[in-house]
Image (cartoon, rainbow, N blue to C red):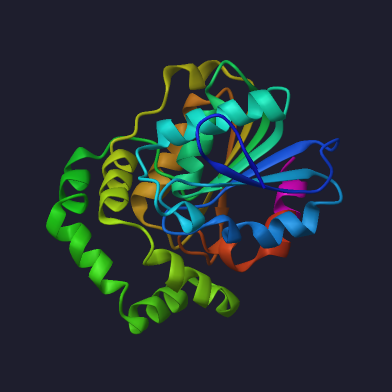
Amino acid sequence: MRQIGVIMKFYEFGERSKPAVMLIHGGGNSKWMFERQAKLIKDQYRVILPELDGHGNECNVIYESSIVEADKMVDYIRCECEGKLFLIGGASLGAQIAMEVCARPEIMVEHAILESGLYTKRPHLASLIASKWMIKWMMDLYQWEWMIKWSFHQYRWPEELLGDIAKDAMKLSFASNRNLYHTYLNYEMPERIASINTKVFLLFGSKEKKMIKQDAFFASKVFKHARVVELKGYNHCGFSFSEPERYVKKIQELI
């Protein structure tokens, strides 16, 4: 584990001499979301798993926004990876942050795998979901075991992650939850996205909400080099959550 500049924890797998891969977990989760994938590819790559503010072991740090998280990751990439990543990946919130990282002129990213992300502003939805009563209601829901189990069934999450998800979902504070939803749903793609040379793959499950699919196709028209990949039979983040071996295989196929 390493820390740099501003406080953020980064967990590494593999040799530092290998091509660097960074995988960013989604909201309400933690580094364990991509830990299984990291262990599968650590012989070929140096795999870096950031832990977002407000999540997991960083639950005492208030989450601010995708832009602030990207700032910290870019600092790390500049100082610890000579400003280069072979690949960046992320799911949901992690996909949005990965997009923001790709847009930064201080670093270079060769490939990006963005799964189940939102990349355009939805202020009306933000005003509803990020309201005090809605955040409190959602936090109360995840105190109930049946809600966690329903989510597992709905999203095809693996049984072995039940304990991790239940524990970390309840760690996210009210302030972090509210900031997360407000900034996630008000995010705007940086203008510089249109000029970068990163080869981008935008993944979404066939059972995703319509807005996730719309944003994948919208973003694909903004990037210079982009391809949309529909994952048949999967719901939100279901691919990265439930199929670590297939996730790794898909990355190898795409790049």
Q: Quadrant of residue 138?
A: bottom left
Q: Quadrant of the C terminus?
A: top right
Farthest-out residue, left: 133
Q: Position of residue 69 (x, y in %)?
A: 46, 36
x%, y% of residue 191?
43, 18
Residue drawn 78% across the image and 59% down it: 40
Instruction: From the viewer's perspective, tell me whether residue 55 is left or right of residue 143.
Output: right
Looking at this rendering, what residue extends furthest in the bottom direction? 146
Q: Is residue 167 visible?
A: yes
The answer to whether 123 is drawn above or below residue 101 in the figure is: below
Depth check: 63 or 29 in front? 63
Residue 231 within the segment the image draws in magenta: no
| Observer-nearest of 121 and 64 | 64
Left or right: 192 as drawn, with respect to 134 = right
Q: Main secondary structure of the magenta part?
A: helix
Q: Position of residue 212 (x, y in %)?
A: 40, 48
Residue 109 appearing in the image: no
Asked where in the image residue 199 lies, by quadrant, the reply is top right
Q: Quadrant of residue 179?
A: top left
Estimate the x, y position of residue 150 in percent, counting from the top left.
38, 79
First to last magenta residue range:
249-255
Residue at the (57%, 22%) spot, across then down: 224
Q: Is residue 122 placed above or below 233 in the rendered structure?
A: above
| Residue in front for this viewpoint, 230 or 108 | 108
What residue is rendered at 21% in x and 49% in y? Answer: 130
The residue located at (67%, 57%) in the rendering is: 247
Is residue 68 rendered to the left or right of residue 132? right
